[in-house]
Image (cartoon, grey):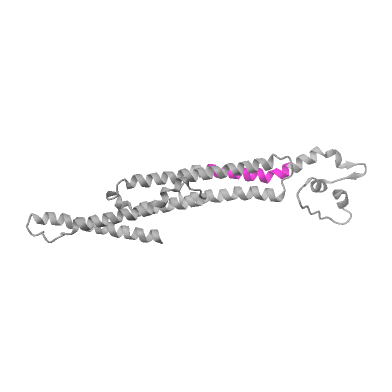
Amino acid sequence: MQIQQSLEELQNNLKEINRQNKLRLLRKILKFLLIGFLIGRGSERRIAELSQRSKLILDNLLKPFEDIAGAEQQIREFADAYTRLTYIERKSADAKSIVPKLEERLGKHRETIIAQAKAAIEQREYTAERLVLEATSSGTYLIYTDRKRCIDIVKSLDEDLKYCGQSAILDGKYISEKQKKMEALLQTVSDYNGDFIKQRKMDHAYLWKKGLLSLDDEQQTAIVTDDKHNLVVAAAGSGKTEVLI
């Protein structure tokens, strides 16, 4: 709301500056005809006052972006900052003639926000990759809580990438590449337990048949599924005791 009000005041100032400039020009023209002495007499002073006020408004609007380089923020906060900056830039386009180096300042802030957003994404991506690698290289069954933690952190980053895509802070190709990596990580986590169980069944094949005792595929799966809490549901006489033992 405060940004909106400041920008409205800025636009009103710019309109008034434009009007005063026209009056000043008219005064110069009519002076030659000796009838322009009373037209636009206070234009110079009024333009100076409005220009100074407009500079102050823009300084206040851009001040929050000056410290963003060292800020610890979430990816979505950088995306929101980029959206605000784009809005300010669009609404203050006519102020470039009265505010020195405004375009340069806006460009610098834009580059900083993009760089910070990418750094935050790269850090989150590294964390997700490390977590998934540790979980899937442990050589043990991936229990529910660890699996959920891996999936949650990957999906969270994927959602932030979509949010960045909507705000247009980052290039579509960059976002697409990162999203493909997240899809690959999710697939790795999704496939891990199935591959683990399949390999364990093969490694312990000599245990599945002893004398008259033979365990079917579902019983084998129940045995090698090494989660914290396993529920074995089967009919009477179907072999639950053998599985538990």
The location of residue 207, given as percent across then percent down, is: 86, 40
For this view, does 116 lie left or right of residue 148?
left
The location of residue 180, given as percent across then percent down, is: 57, 43
Regarding residue 46, the answer to whether it shows in the image is yes
Is residue 115 shown above or below 7?
above
Residue 239 lies in the magenta-colored region: no
The location of residue 136, given as percent across then percent down, is: 68, 41
**Foreground residue, 188 or 153?**
153
The location of residue 172, given as percent across then percent down, is: 48, 45
For this view, does 111 lie left or right of residue 188?
left
Is residue 115 shown above or below 56?
above
The residue located at (34%, 46%) in the rendering is: 103
State which region is magenta: 177-195
The residue located at (34%, 44%) in the rendering is: 104
For this view, does 77 lie left or right of residue 147?
left
The residue located at (85%, 49%) in the rendering is: 243
Q: How many marks?
A: 0
The answer to which image quadrant residue 123 occupies is top right
Residue 189 lies in the magenta-colored region: yes
The secondary structure making up most of the magenta span is helix
